[in-house]
Amino acid sequence: MKNRWLFALIIAALFAFAGYAVFFIAPDEATMHAIQRIFYFHASSGWAAMEGTGIVFFANVAYLRKRQPKWDWLAVSAVEVSLAFWSVVLVTGPIWAHPVWGIWWAWDWRLTLTLVLWILYVCYLVLRTLVADPERRAAVSAIFGIFVFLGVPLDYLSIRIFRTQHPQPVLFGGPNSGLDPTMVKVFFSCSALMTLLMILLVIERYRLERLRYEAEEMRLVIEERAETKSQNREMQRRTALGG
Amino acid sequence: MQNFWSLFAAYLAFWAIFFIYDFTVARRLARVEKDLAQMRQQIREP
């Protein structure tokens, strides 16, 4: 309980600091003005989502190689947390796009691929509910997770490869790209905070998966004990009848 | 401030998504911890 409060406090402090940096430290952008500040939440959430999917990929490969349940717990935890970050990206993007583009959504490569990835990671979670055997479930979802991850580098590179409605990269982009140095500092601070938040959430979610496994093991022990007890009773009854 | 409400909505959505997600994880954790405590009790009983 104490840990939970500490955890909640850390998260609240991270959000408050990010909010302060975005609203009071970052300068106003010349053409978009205040609405550009969405970029700090939107893009840094996208970074954290991609890092989360990197963890999913790593854990899926590790599970298929070693067949240890801990890798499956890590994969499913990172999928859920990444989905939360992808959701932030998909919600804040259109809120920014409406005043800037005049439309909420455009079916360009970046937006469409992000939506497809979000749907596929939801499918990953649905798939897990359809397979009862834990080992089979872990193996099937690991294969599916590796397959889905193939779309992540394509999503990242889509704004560099294709002509998209989505803005071209402002960091590590072409010769005419770039950000004001204060904006860069705020962006990297937000990205670091999002990464930390993602790690904290994965740790918390992993604990849930580990406890579920423990509960499942304990349930099997109880069922076995109950069966042994009923067999013993049956034997005693038969012995009494025979005697 | 121009587009203040859009910015506010985005920040609110950001908070809401993580709050709701963390709340669901906390609820699931509480349920599993309760189940585990009950099962430990059952195992201790002769």
Image (cartoon, coloured by chain):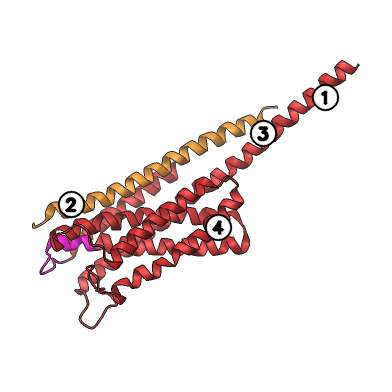
Chain colours: A red, B orange
Circle 2 marks a residue in which chain?
B
Q: Are marks 3 and 2 on the same chain?
A: no
Circle 1 marks a residue in which chain?
A
Do callouts 3 and 4 mark residues in contact (Cβ within 8 Å)?
no
- The quadrant in which the C terminus of chain A is found is top right
Do callouts 1 and 2 mark residues in contact (Cβ within 8 Å)?
no
Q: Element at badge 4? A: helix
Q: Residues within 10 Å of mark 2 (few under 14, many from 20)?
A: some
> Who's the residue at 33% across and 49% down the image?
B18
Q: Nearer the viewer, mark 3 or mark 2?
A: 3
User: What is the distance, in whole Å, between disc 1 and disc 2 at their CAs?
Assistant: 71 Å
Which kind of residue does numbered mark 1 sit on? Met
> Number of marks in the image?
4
Q: Element at badge 1? A: helix
Q: Which residue is mark 4?
A: A71
Which kind of residue does numbered mark 4 sit on? Trp
Do callouts 4 and 1 mark residues in contact (Cβ within 8 Å)?
no
User: What is the distance, in whole Å, between disc 3 and disc 4 at their CAs?
Assistant: 27 Å
Circle 3 marks a residue in which chain?
A
Residue A65: give x, y in percent of width and height: 61, 64
**Relative height, residue A139 to residue B36 (above, below):** below
Q: Which residue is mark 2?
A: B8
Which kind of residue does numbered mark 2 sit on? Phe
Q: Which residue is mark 3?
A: A223
